[in-house]
Image: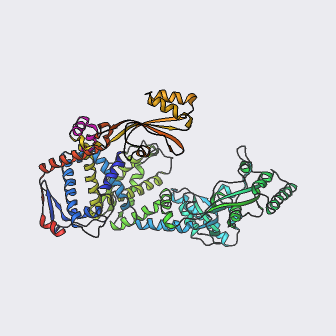
Amino acid sequence: MKKNILKFFLAIIGIIILSTSVAQNSGDKTLMTIGGEKITETEFLNIYRKNNFNNDVIDKKSLEEYLELFINFKLKVKEAEELGLDTLTTFKDELKGYRNQLAQPYLTDNAMDEKLLLQAFERKQYDLRASHILIKVNADANPEDTLAAFQSIMEISKEIMNGADFSEMAVTYSEDPSAKDRPATSRRPYMKGNKGDLGYFTVFDMVYPFENGAYNTAVGEISMPVRTTYGYHLIKVTDKKKALGNVLVAHILILFPKNATHQDSLKAETKVKKAYDELTSGTKFADVVRKYSDDKGTIEKEGMLPWFGVNRMIPEFIMEISALSDTGEITKPFLTNYGWHIVKLVEKKGLPSFEEDIPELKGRIVRSDRSKESQKSFIRQSKTEYNFTEYKENLEEIYSLVNDTIFKAKWHPENTNQSDNLLFQLDGNDYFQKDFIAYLEKTQSVTPREDIKVFVNKKFNSFINASIIAYEDSQLEKKYPEFRTLVKEYRDGILLFELTDQKVWSKAINDSIGLAEFYNTHKNNYMWDERLNTSIYTFSNPAYVKQARKMARKGFNKNDILNAINPDSVIYLTIIDDKCEKGDNQIIDKINWKKGITDNFEVDGQIVFVDVHEVLSPQPKLLSEARGIITADYQNFLEKEWIKELRMKYPVDVNQDVFSKIK
């Protein structure tokens, strides 16, 4: 909650707007001093422009007004520093959190981010159908296993190039279990193999390297081996078409019985033809569904299936649906491994425009494995910029130090006193064996056992990447003036928020004695206008109006009248007591402002009369009646008094010559 309030507060003072700051230089003139601290012309103008919506024009009047606000802002920050709020651990942690957020755009390749965004949008416009052959190899496998897997996939590729059928090779060699027929077990039925056919898919449906291989391969062609976390793939693209998007359909399904005979197949075909004939003769789709469909889960829903995209249905289904263009159009009967189908198009959701799709695409990119591409590119650029030099031969000594206890998070390195050989250099900074050993020990966790050398190499790459990012992060204030300025503004904003909360906002709410004293001094500022103290009688049944008027004239109280008119919980009469100023209540505005019972009149088809008990003269509102506005005024009062104190404590001297030139 506090964080949300702080963000709103920072927005108000204009310091979270990411605009490029004017770089300060040695010739920057001093605009003012506050308590002996110099404030430059550039710093003032930078924040002024962020708050000035018409920032192409410097308006003299707004500039003078803003000067006072700026001075007050700086006075509060000065006081917070004097009180040591900037030394508190809570402050440092909060600022660190905001700085980490601000730093993120500087620690990735923004050009790559844009490229990935455009690439995802362009690929989303098409659906692919592809088959693959997989030879498994772990992503972190040792070089020998990796080479063996690569040689295997290349041998398969050569056979296909020499005329072997891709689908038959998939059945024979692919290590994707779905390629082959799988016999029934106690846990699942018989499953027919797909011969490597993955069906239709679009962007984000596959791991990124596989997606790249597929979208970069022409229809009918076969890719070079593609490496993913699963192993090596050969990809054959069999179709590419305009994206289907998401569709809503209803269907009729005629199932084949288990172990269907030729006779069973003929019966199913005859049944689906009858269903189709009825549809083409004008029978409602829902009626045909109820009469013929074997899909019990959709019969009561008129055959409706949930919304789906191309990766959620078998290829034959997608091909037939893609041919439908008009709402209500139906397919001819078509056959799949599940049986006969007839499908009706209910609705299609077209793809959004690029601008509309940006938020969704960005979110999908962040959640997908392609998000690593931006950081990889950033790492490559940083290595070049900072003259990265690696001495990987010095890893040999570390291999012998690591044992299986590291996979249980119980590894404690020994004999590391001499581990001072270089592993790499970055911008003239040396990173030694002992630095990597410390990283290994700190980041160890319970993980599956693997080859020690492979594990250490993987962790070494992580150590390099982490070191590069940490070093670049440490340079941000030096490299980017706008980042340095923005972090300082966040710092000042947090300090200002904390101290203002202590001195003004929370104090006004919690200081009940001070609030009461302020109210008593200024109560005539919170006046009621002339009001009526009334009871408004509203009848749903006019038969009871006379009885109620008679009881009201005799002085019966509200509850007695309601109990007499509304027996057995039937509501014939409502009575609302109210004290109203003019304009508060349309009924009160209709009557004469004098004591007594009004004539009957009609409001929204109901009979109404008003019992005016008293005409109230103007009087101060009670503190409880106007606490919100009184508290707000008390906060303003506290802030003004606080500013007076701060101006006495920290003398302000504005260089009018510099300010005049700005104006």
Name the foreground residue: 137 vs 541.
541
Side of 295 where 90 appears, left or right: left
Is residue 285 within the magenta segment?
A: no
Inspect this view and state whether residue 434 appears. Answer: no
Side of 131 where 437 appears, left or right: left
The structure residue drawn at horizontal position 54% and vertical position 33%, both measured from the top left corner, is 544
The structure residue drawn at horizontal position 45% and vertical position 55%, both measured from the top left corner, is 458
Name the foreground residue: 193 vs 573.
573
Give the magenta range: 504-520
Residue 239 horizontal/vertical position (percent) = 65, 69
Residue 341 horizontal/vertical position (percent) = 76, 58
Q: Is residue 324 above or below residue 397?
A: below
* Quadrant position of residue 352: bottom right
Side of 57 where 129 appears, left or right: right
Coloration of the structure image: rainbow
Residue 216 horizontal/vertical position (percent) = 56, 70
Residue 574 horizontal/vertical position (percent) = 50, 35
Q: Main secondary structure of the magenta part?
A: helix
* Quadrant position of residue 127: bottom right
The structure residue drawn at horizontal position 42% and vertical position 50%, both measured from the top left corner, is 400
Side of 370 where 261 appears, left or right: right
Q: How many marks?
A: 0
Is residue 513 within the magenta segment?
A: yes
Q: Quadrant of the C terminus?
A: bottom left
Q: Is residue 625 above or below residue 492?
A: above
| Residue furthest to the right | 263
Inspect this view and state whether residue 26 appears. Answer: yes
Q: Is residue 104 above or below residue 515?
A: below
Q: Quadrant of the N terminus?
A: top left
